[in-house]
Amino acid sequence: MDFAQLMDEFSPFDARLADLDYRNDLYGHARANCPVHRSNALGGFWVVSGYEEIVEVLQDPGTFASGPSVRIPTNPARPTLPPIDSDAPAHRDWRRLLNTFFSPAGLTPHRETIRCIAGDLAESIAEKGQCDLMAEFAEPFSAYITGRVLMGIDDDDRIKEIQRSNHGIAQAHDRAETEANWNRLHAHVEDLYDERVRQPRPDDLVTAITQAEVEGRPVTRDEACSCLMILHLGGLDTVTDAIGSITVRLTEQPDLTELVANPEWMRINLDEFLRLNTPVDHEGRTVTRDVELAGRHLRQGDRVMLMYTCANRDERAFEHADRLDFQRQRNRHLAFGMGPHRCVGSHLARLEIEIGFEELLGRIRDLRITPGDRVTWKVGLSFGPKRVPISYRAQPRR
Ligand code: HEM
């Protein structure tokens, strides 16, 4: 394969990346030979695939801005989504607001709700003996958490609608379908905003966002709705992908099952799973002044794509990077990013994954890929399995 030529036209949306051997070979070539490389695809952008180079970018948000959008290519019809697409000083205000809710202490009151959601879903699949784990456990799990825990919605039909729209945004086959799903999700967050303005609730994230002040002025309805959009988009596919990838791993290494079922063990070791199978494939930045990165000259206005999935397997940063190693001393992986935009939902994600597996593996064991079926993988912004067809044995109810 002519990797150099493939990198010249690299796009993270290339369907060939769903083949994991192709993906690993191409990313391996990029890290070793061209950690900062110019691709002509998607209007032209710099592919940053080395760990060290990505850290350099993330530590200099003044030169590598998140605004007006971290999406490459940027869709001009879509609004800027704070906090992910914003820069200081507005970004600091948004984070101050969100950090309170998403801190470990802020999430403690929601632990039991998360457990109930996971327990009910595990129960719903247990006796069937086989299912697609993504469609029947992982996707509804994160949708219910986004709906009930973050948005304070009790209506299950409404939550299922959120799940459908989000799935459509992430996995639609054409642009019109993606836009229709985006518009449906946006209409839903506008309804949420209007409801909470009419009837504010105490200790409620949506109410806090409707009442937020950024840069010394109240946020507009559009800004608040954009923040609600990213909270929907950020919390759904990511956790779903992590649960899917870890489940695939369990079918390959069943000896890990007992460990993964133990939330104490997961609390310490989840990072190594996230390093090796990183759910957010990439995010973008925009260069604000001419600058040099790994010997390449970047110009003001250039776009850079930070390949998190790729950098997390960089041998320069992680010994035998292609292997799971729970003994690693330093695991400064980039699965949650780094710097001011480091994932605001990381504590929630950890809680969901730890409790999710505790409940799932409390009800089903001996997970294997259903004979004659196979796992398929996504390409694009998020990296994880599309389908995980598993067969299993139900455990007695606890
Ligand atoms: C395993 C699960 C998750 C992974 C791997 C993940 C990954 C990431 C990454 C890599 C970033 C940095 C983006 C950048 O560099 O521009 C990020 C930011 C963000 N994440 Fe997550 N995320 C996860 C779960 C969640 C959850 C559950 C939420 C809840 C709503 C969430 C909400 C956000 C938001 C709002 C941001 C923007 C933060 C900012 O710009 O200050 N994420 N996430």
Image (cartoon, rainbow, N blue to C red):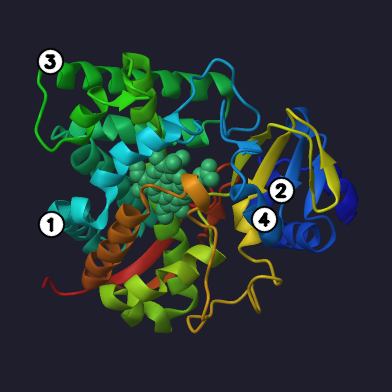
Residue drawn at (47%, 36%) of the image: 84
Residue drawn at (37%, 56%) of the image: 133
* Marks 3 & 4, CB-CB < 8 Å contact: no
* Marks 1 & 3, CB-CB < 8 Å contact: no
Q: Which amino acid, mark 3?
A: Arg
As drawn, is 151 to the left or to the right of 242? left
Q: Which residue is mark 3?
A: 198
* Marks 4 & 2, CB-CB < 8 Å contact: yes
Residue 14 position within the rendered picture, expressed as x and y whole percent measured from the top left: 70, 42
Q: Which amino acid, mark 1?
A: Glu
**Is the N terminus in the top left, top right, bottom left or bottom right quadrant?**
bottom right
* Marks 1 & 2, CB-CB < 8 Å contact: no
Residue 368 position within the rendered picture, expressed as x and y whole percent measured from the top left: 42, 71
Q: Is residue 10 visible?
A: yes
- With respect to residue 179, does 150 lie above or below? below
Mark 1 vs mark 2, foreground winner is: 1
- The picture quadrant where one finds residue 93 is top left
Helix, strand or loop at label 3? It is helix
Mark 1 vs mark 3, foreground winner is: 3
The disc label shown at residue 112, or none: 1
* Comes first in the chain, label 4 or label 1: 4
Helix, strand or loop at label 4? It is loop
Helix, strand or loop at label 2? It is helix
The disc label shown at residue 103, or none: none
Q: Which residue is mark 2?
A: 16
Q: Which residue is mark 4?
A: 19
Mark 4 vs mark 1, foreground winner is: 1
